[in-house]
Image: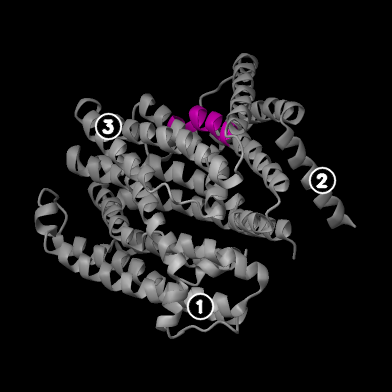
Amino acid sequence: MSRVALTIKNAWIALIFQLIYILIQFFSRNIFLDNLGNDFIGTVDTLKSILQFLNLSELGIGTAVGFALYKPIYDNNKDEINEIVGYLGFLYKRIGYFVLGSSLLLLVFFPFFFEDTNINLAKIIFLFAALLISNLLSYFFAYYTFLLQADQKGFINITIGQSVFILRLFLQCLVLIYFKDVWLWILLELLTPFIYIFILRKKVRQTYPWLIFNLKITKVIRNNQKGLLKKIKQISFHKLGTFVSNSTDNIIIFSMVNPAMVAFVGNYQMIMNNINLLVSKMFEGTNASVGNLVAENNIENMLKVFWEFMALRFFIAGCSTVLLYLGFDELITLWLGEEYLLSQTILIILIIIFFMLQVRQPIDSFKQAYGLYGDIWSPVIQSLINLFFSILFVFKYGVLGVFLGTMISQFIIVMLWRPYYVFKYGFKINHWIYWKGFIMHLFYLSVAFISYYYLSMYLDKEENANLFSLFTELLKFGALFLAIYLVLLSVFSLGFKNLIKRFTNLIRKKNK
């Protein structure tokens, strides 16, 4: 199967499962909040953030291994693949022991950390243990997923993982509705990862019968992987920056505002994260495609694909931004009630962060494919900027201040520095080529926004009594913006024109 065909297969399977997961997650979140309460859900979100902090010990090993696997997969070098995957298992098992030890030490401080909450401490400890074991299983038994991703077979992991965890949410809802049992709810959180691991390992054995599951890591293998270890050390700093940007917000809100506010923010984050995941699933497998493309080392073809990705990401980000601004508050009101609404300013900041996250992805894909992680200072600076401004602003602006810090750090490092770094040391061409293309796409988007603003005045805006009427309303206004933006990009964006040609040719080949 061709690289494009595999990319599309990964995308549509991931998209279907993510849509199902989003629907049941919306349904379940409402049940969870009604039956478990804001404080408990806020505590769950905070515990997940703490575990993400402990998972920093992973330090980007998976990312580095994914990058290292592109070439041997391209060359069909099974011995080298076995060596790299075996070395990954060797490192991950040691990290698993470290996470376990750190978690047990952290449990000693739980009575002090959660002294202001009215939730039973035994429940908190049991919940933390369930979440911890789920994490540890991935370290000891699920590291083969990186091979599936690098080999553009990520759809296997998605099908198994999403099916199991959709089942978990469904069963947790039933437990709360019919039994009102929190302990049983947590028990399901604990048991479902075991089912996932069992099915996954069985499928990996079928897909790669030549793969050695328990390869003995000798001193020779460790010496052979010194270059990979160096890359891991570089990526570790980048993982730190990503964590501080994405995972400390809830911890700051929990400690400096209140636990219930974490649940309020969590509702917004759940919607944003699900939309982001939905878009990411559409691009499932593209990192592996870009990795293979870089392995071919055709600069003209790489730049062509880069601008196709950039045009498509702008198109998706632009359409998503309009829909989020128009429908977010009404969705929260219809879904949970007006009491769960946050300010309009917070919503705008979250939308800006979402937009930046979308349009940065083409740069991130090529950065990973080239293995460009030498700028170890940049994530450290990003972390310091994020923490400084988040803590500074939280005293004056509350929750809004936390997200302002995140936005500022993302803009300085991710939007300004990273493109310069990739174009200079990856493509090895003048970085002004990037800024010219990026600014032009911002201009097309601005024209689309202005045109939409004036044309939308001729459409009637109605009050929405239910989710279906909100959906039809967003469909009406979204279709207008989509049509305007689609015409603009089709006429003026070379990357978008090439993208249309690529899909047209693929459809023709399929029909033949």
Which residue is identified by label 1?
Answer: 83
Tell me what residue is drawn at x 42 percent, y 40 percent.
335
Tell me which secondary structure the magenta stretch mostly adopts.
Answer: helix
> Where in the figure is residue 380, as x and y percent of width and height?
32, 44
Q: Residue at x 53, y 79 (%)?
A: 82
Is-magenta flag for residue 68? no
- Left/right of residue 202 with respect to residue 233 in the rendered view: right
Give the residue type that dot 2 points to: Thr
Q: Position of residue 357 (x, y in %)?
A: 48, 40
Q: Which residue is mark 2?
A: 504
Q: Report the front residue among 112 and 98.
A: 98
- Element assignment for label 2: helix
Q: Secondary structure at mark 3?
A: helix
| Spatial separation of the CA atoms under disc 1 and disc 2 | 40 Å
Q: Residues within 10 Å of mark 1 (few under 14, many from 20)?
A: many
Magenta-span inclusion, residue 326: yes
Residue at the (51%, 37%) spot, across then down: 420
Q: Which residue is mark 3?
A: 389
Residue type at tag 1: Glu
Which secondary structure lies at badge 1? helix
Other-residue count near label 2 (Cα within 10 Å), few / some / many at <14 / 14–19 / ≥20: few
Range of residues picked out in magenta: 317-330
Which quadrant, please, contains the C terminus?
A: bottom right
Q: Earlier in the sequence, mark 1 or mark 3?
A: 1
Instruction: Give the CA distance from mark 2 to mark 3.
Output: 47 Å
Q: Is residue 51 above or below residue 271?
A: below
| Residue drawn at (25%, 63%) of the image | 128
Mark closer to the chain start, 2 or 3: 3
Q: Dividing the picture into quarters, in which one does residue 339 lie?
A: top left
